[in-house]
Image (cartoon, helix red, strand yellow):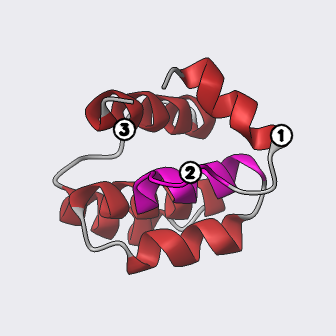
Amino acid sequence: MTEKEFFDTLEEDGPPEGWSPALHALWFAEKGDWDRAHRIAQDDDTSDGSWVHAYLHREEGDIGNAHYWYRRAGRTMPDLSVEDERRAIIAELLKADGS
């Protein structure tokens, strides 16, 4: 799946089946449903889930908590805007998914 195809799915009522929880969380973040995105990321014990969880706390402004989740994901907080980071995460996860 391309990034454009990902963003085209935002017109649907829900994210496509078969995506990772991290991509589901990002889909809801793109739709403006931070709480649902956070619940999904919080329940995802993978490094990708921790990365999305970190991003979400950064987006909310809870930088201390974000740093904790970046460490859990084996990453550091990037020097990007939150929107650019979200797009970078989406691109990397789509690439890793092989969709």
Which residue is at 62% across, 35% downward?
83
**Side of 69 relative to 28 (left or right):** left
- Cα distance, mark 3 to mark 1? 20 Å
- Residue pushed farthest front? 17
| Up-down relation of residue 76 to residue 28 (above or below) | above
Q: Amino acid at mark 1?
A: Glu
The percent coordinates of residue 99 (x first, y second) are 39, 30
The disc at residue 70 is none
**Side of 45 relative to 39 (left or right):** left
In the image, the segment drawn in magenta is 15-31
Q: Nearer the viewer, residue 76 or 48?
A: 48
The tag earlier along the polypeptide, 2 or 3, is 2
Which residue is at 56% across, 51% downward?
26
Taking the magenta stretch, the answer to whether it contains residue 30 is: yes
The disc at residue 11 is 1
Residue that carries the numbered disc 2 in the rendered image = 26
Q: Answer yes or no: do the residues labelled 2 and 3 have beta carbons within 8 Å?
A: yes
Q: Residues within 10 Å of mark 2 (few under 14, many from 20)?
A: many
| Up-down relation of residue 74 to residue 85 (above or below) | below
Which quarter of the figure has residue 36? bottom right
Residue that carries the numbered disc 3 in the rendered image = 93
